[in-house]
Every structure is written in C-alpha cells, then in structure tokens.
Image (cartoon, rainbow, N blue to C red):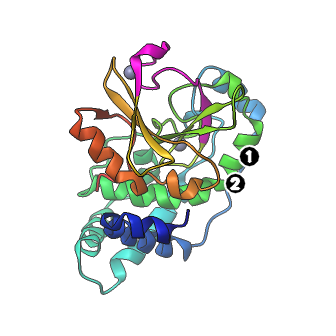
C-alpha cells in the first residue's frame, strides 16, 4: 500500500497528510547530531527492573534532540505561510525563546517533566518527538539488537516509556507475535499475544475486536474490562504507513463513537 493510494481511499486524511509532510520536509533539512550508543552493561540492571532506557542513568542524553526540536520550530515559524500551523509554531517559537536552556527543557518535557508550560503543548510534543526520533534512530536500532524481548514484555515503551500508539500482529501461528509500537520514539517491542496492555488483564475473554469494513489490515482491539482500545495492524511490509497513527484516525473516531477510551499516547492531539 502506498500513501497516495491510501489518501485516494481516505480523502478526509489529506489535511493531516499535508501537515505531516510539511513537518517531515522541514525536519529532513536539520542536521542530526551523532547519538552516543549506551554501554548496555551499565543499563542491564535497570532494564531488568523495567526502567525505560531514556529514564536510566546509563542512558543517552536527549538534549541534542531538544536542540533539533528548536531548529525545527524555528524553520516552521520562519516561513511566510499563514494558516494554523504557522501561527501556532510562531507563538510557540516566540515563547520558547524566552526560556533559558530551552533544548534541555524540551528534552525533559518529552520525558514527562511538567514544569515547562508551552502555549501549544500538543504541537510541541509532536514537533519535538519528530525531531528527537531522528536523533535517536541509531540508538533505537542498537537497542533492538541488544534487548532480550522475553525480559521486557511490558505495556510501555522500553526506550522512552510511552504507552503504545498501535499494535501489530506479525508472523504465522504458532509463532505469531504481537508487537506494540511507540508513536513517539518509533520503537516496536513484543507483548503477550493475549491480554490488555492497558489494565494488564491477561485473560482472553475480556478482549474483543472490531473489524472495519473495507480495511483488510486494520482493526480495533478493545478490552471489555477497562474499555481501552488499541488499533492493530494485521499485516507486514507497510509499517511506515499503517503504524503512523494519523493514517488510521478514522478508527479512533469509530472507537470513540462506541464509547471506548484511547489510552495510547498520541502525537496528533494538536
Ligand atoms: Zn518510545
Ligand atoms: Zn484493559
């Protein structure tokens, strides 16, 4: 599936596609500082204890990601375009220029520090994660190679600690796996095939799936116990498209109409 075909079939996603393309284009023009790969032996104990990599003292410093976020914001704010994105990035850029050590503060903000109170927090989170995910890419890759999936299997991202934005089913039975996908840093990790990743009920009979007409590869899994749902990509090969979260916004609307709760971390609450 290509993005063009997807947008032909889901024309209501165009505004989001345009926004995402504009931000990605601006981000692609920013130099990516080299990230230090952690010494995995220093992190091992924290990993076993369930501490996400970026919250560990052995971790990578995210400050260069904060610097990239600053540069991205500046780029988006400096254009002459009008419209909501331009207006909001300008307001955000102006406000953040007044903050001392802003790159550090942005990095802390991404990891849950609530002392930075920007005017458009959802927009800052989206832009800053877009930039920081680029900085972190080699670290996420190295971490994938080192991590023993059997020893994690937690409901939150092993790299940044966010709740999964989506799930993916891969492989064929009996070895079929459920991966959870982080919408922030881009990590994918293994989780139990059965069970709710939000309230962590492990039994199967509390789980249901909503099949969406016309969507061969996407469905909504939800938990009858806590009413949380998780969008699931039931396929392989088109991960960047199907796991982008915004590309399946219509599923969020269907879930909401059925009274289900989104507990997944979202970068698209702009
Ligand atoms: Zn993550
Ligand atoms: Zn649940």
Give the image location of residue 100, x and y in percent.
37, 58
Q: Quick one: SS at disc 2?
A: helix
Whether label 2 touches label 1, CB < 8 Å = yes
Give me the C-alpha separation between circle 2 and circle 1: 6 Å
Label 2, residues with CA under 10 Å away: few <14, some 14-19, many ≥20? some
Label 1, residues with CA under 10 Å away: few <14, some 14-19, many ≥20? some
Q: Is residue 38 visible?
A: no
Q: Which residue is mark 2?
A: 138
Left or right: residue 213 versus residue 45 is left
Q: Nearer the viewer, residue 14 or 133?
A: 14
Q: Residue at x 40, y 25 (%)?
A: 208
As displayed, is residue 31 above or below residue 165? below
Q: Residue furthest bottom?
A: 80
Left or right: residue 8 versus residue 255 is right
Q: Residue at x 59, y 56 (%)?
A: 238
Q: Residue at x 59, y 48 (%)?
A: 61
Name which quarter of the figure residue 47 lies in: top right
As displayed, is residue 240 above or below residue 192? below
Name which quarter of the figure residue 19 lies in: bottom left
> Which contiguous range is marked in magenta?
188-208
Give the image location of residue 212, x and y in percent.
38, 44
Q: Which residue is mark 1?
A: 142
Q: Quick one: SS at disc 1?
A: helix
């Amino acid at each position: 599936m290509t993005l063009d075909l997807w947008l032909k079939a889901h024309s209501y996603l165009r505004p989001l596609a345009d926004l995402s393309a504009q931000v990605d284009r601006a981000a692609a023009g920013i130099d990516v500082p080299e990230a230090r790969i952690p010494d995995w032996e220093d992190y091992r104990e924290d990993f076993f204890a369930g501490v996400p990599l970026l919250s560990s003292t052995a971790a990578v410093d995210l400050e260069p990601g904060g610097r990239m976020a600053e540069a991205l914001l500046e780029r988006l704010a400096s254009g002459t375009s009008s419209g909501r994105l331009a207006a909001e990035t300008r307001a955000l850029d102006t406000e953040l220029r007044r903050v001392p050590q802003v790159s550090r503060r942005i990095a802390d903000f991404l990891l849950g520090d609530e002392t930075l109170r920007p005017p458009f927090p959802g927009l800052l989170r989206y832009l800053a994660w877009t930039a920081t995910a680029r900085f972190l890419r080699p670290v996420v890759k190295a971490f994938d190679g080192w991590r023993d999936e059997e020893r994690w299997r937690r409901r939150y991202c092993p790299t940044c600690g966010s709740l999964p934005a989506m799930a993916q089913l891969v492989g064929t039975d009996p070895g079929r796996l459920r991966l959870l996908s982080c919408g922030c840093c881009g990590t994918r990790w293994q989780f139990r095939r059965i069970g709710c990743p939000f309230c962590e009920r492990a039994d199967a009979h509390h789980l249901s799936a909503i099949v969406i007409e016309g969507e061969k590869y996407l469905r909504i899994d939800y938990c009858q116990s806590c009413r949380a749902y998780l969008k699931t990509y039931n396929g392989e090969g088109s991960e960047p498209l199907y796991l982008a979260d915004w590309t399946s916004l219509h599923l969020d609307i269907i879930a909401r109409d059925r009274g289900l709760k989104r507990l997944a971390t979202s970068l698209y609450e702009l």
